[in-house]
Amino acid sequence: MRTVLNVLNFVLGGFLTTLSWLFATLISIVLIFTLPLTRSCWEITKLSFVPYGNEAIHVDELNPQGKNTLLNTGGTLLNVLWLIFFGWWLCIMHIMAGIAQCITIIGIPVGIANFKIAAIALWPVGRRVVPVEVARAARDANARRRFHAWLYNLRIFIALTGTAALPWWLGEVKLTIPLTLGVVAAALADLDDRVSAFGALLIAIYTMLGISLYEHWYQQPLFLLAGAVWYNLLTLAGHLIFPIRPLQDNLARCYESLASFLEIKATLFDPDIEEESQAPMLQLAMANSQLVTMLNQTKSSLLTRLRGDRGQRGTRRTLHYYFVAQDIHERASSSHIQYQALRDKFRYSDVMFRFQRLLTMQSQACQQLSRSILLRVPYQHDPRFERAFTHLDSALDRIRASHATASEIKALGFLITNLRAIDAQLANIESEQAIAEPQNDPENRLADDKLTGFDDIWQRLKLNLTPESALFRHAVRMSLVLCVDYAFIQFTGLQHGYWILLTSLFVCQPNYSATRRRLALRIIGTLVGVAVGLPLLWLVPSLEGQLILIVITGVLFFAFRNVQYAHATMFITLLVLLCFNLLGEGFEVALPRVIDTLLGCAVAWAAVSFVWPDWRFRRLSRVVERAFNANCRYLDAILEQYHQGRDNRLEYRIARRDAHNRDAELASVVSNMSSEPRVSAEMREAAFRLLCLNHSFNSYISALGAHREQLSHGDTLMLLDDAVCYVDDALHHLPVDEERVQTALAELSARISQLETRAETKEPLVLQQIGLLIALLPEISRLQQQISQCSE
């Protein structure tokens, strides 16, 4: 049917539209300065040629993880220019052409095509024409994000509408300024419970900015607090209406991160990956870091909910989902074979593609589960999984018949078993029996990290009262930055100088790379905001129009703040200009806003570069040591269960979480190193290689944990005990003992090869994983020594 409609469209006039847009594409290439618009013209050409079965969608919806904020900012600028010079009349032209075609009845296919082109012609930069199925899948995957954003933006809209409408109704328009700024401060602090101190600083600086608004000193602070209270009342109302919504949002994001992790894991089974390529493993380590962060946030939300809960069904369900996510993470992060060896051996076998497809399907299942949690509908497991496993079993039977080695067959068999276990978790996640398990069961308890008294508070303070603590360094930097900014304002007497304080507060981040990234985006957003704002003030002179724009720009600021910071800065700059224009100062404050932003950014950059810079306190060797210590504790917890039997007790889950947290910490430190100055190429390469090895090491341990059960074979248990001791010895002894460790590992390898195991038990898997672990130890030991020497 699509083909017929596309042919009708082409014959009845679509060819003219296609030729016109193709000509526009060629012109944009020839003129050079219009090259940035060439891709947009080409996308419209594609849609004009084949409108049925295709749809225009933004690149950010196609690839949410690959957003480029800097490029998106340029795209917005181009869209604004396009809209002003071409977009509006092109859109109207295609709408009129579509109406005219529809009137003729026979031209309806062309008319519908014109309506499609009108939509993309209005705002085309960043849009891509893809098959309808791809666009629908991308939009479904983003349903949770859009729904959550809609609720949040609705709250912001109501809050800002109130702060604009009430002063207008009272005839006190300048009251809009403190009320709006109070809402902004409260909403910024509401994004994360840990930034309440940031909100207090923000209120203080806003008070300085508007100190001349009122005759009495106490009036403006009261109005700022009134705006904050108004926003928090709306937030409270939201929690009363949707009491479990924040927990569901975190849990949905958790499964979304798990889906991304599985998707990246699937790429490791791509047989065409170049030999020795570390890129997939690095991507997997970074995805694991994000997943661990989401698991920790979900755990915090669960603990908050459980403290005031009385065993409600909704909370029991989310607790069950959380434990399933933990178990899937352990199994998904486990490795049963060296991936490069697997790719080399089975490069031309369909088994690699079947493993890759299964992991991709499980990733999609986690995405579907994320949407089900948010929409509060039961999860429906895909029946195609059983067929995929059946075909994978058949592929493995063919490999057995092709004279593959026994060790390779066993490794692939363990991998299938692991994937079946993940499938079973997903298929049975709605099990009423699992959800009904009592919360006081030892396996259903969560570790509570909350403060338990003054002693605990003092101990945590002591841990951070040293330059070795990133929190302490950031606190000192911020204090010094604000002090320098304030002294500069007092010395120069700048009228709107408190914007310097405000800029430094927003730009100065705990580490160098984050500060540098935010600094560039802040400057770009401010410059664009002023460039757009000045003509906007002239085009919208009415009071009512400016109040409406204050509401719109405020909502857009919060809509973009966590996804495109430069856009958010542009909109908050517009909001500031509009607020000051209520006092008749909109044009006067534009230049000071730019200058103060540049000064504030300069002070923030100087602080992170020269005041206890991160590269002087990085102590990568200590981070590595903590990571391997956590791995050893995780291995000890697994060893205990091979002796005593499998359970999911709290102590085991704490050891597992700590190992994943330390792996995430190492990934974060190594990632920050990539953008820091004064890091040698040798050090950077060694750090990235060690990150990959640590993640592989952790994944081999996770495989032991995923298959843990009580073993009865004494020789295997003794070998496992000795292996754990050898691993601990190799990771913790000084380099002078390396020869002794190497000798011990060689003896252990010989014992593994001589030990006979029973194929129907987990003994072959235990020996396989021990072999994989000890194979990594020599290179890990060498890199640890190299990093320690470079750090000195």
Image (cartoon, rainbow, N blue to C red):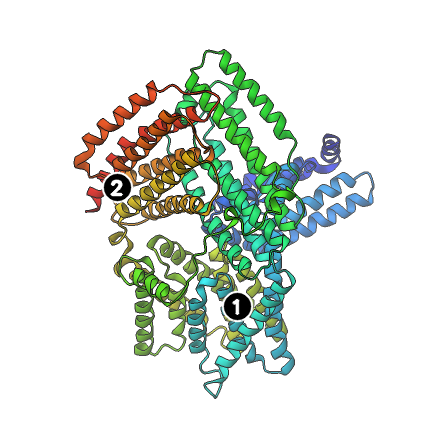
Q: Quadrant of residue 509?
A: bottom left
Q: Judge whether 252 appears above or below 539 on screen.
A: above
Q: Residue at x 41, y 20 (%)?
A: 757
Give the residue pinned by disc 1. 575
> Residue 161, position in %: x, y?
62, 70
Identify which residue, 758 or 355, lies in the foreground.
Answer: 758
Give the residue pinned by disc 2. 683
Disc 2/disc 1 C-alpha distance (Å): 45 Å
Task: Label 1: state its secondary structure.
Answer: helix
Identify which residue, 390 or 479, lies in the foreground.
Answer: 390
- In the rendered view of the protein, which quadrant contains the N terminus? top right
Residue furthest bottom as drawn: 215
> Residue 690, position in %: x, y?
31, 38
Q: Residue at x 31, y 64 (%)?
A: 477
> Residue 177, position in %: x, y?
53, 76
Q: Is residue 465 left or right of residue 381?
A: left
Identify which residue, 548 or 375, lies in the foreground.
Answer: 375
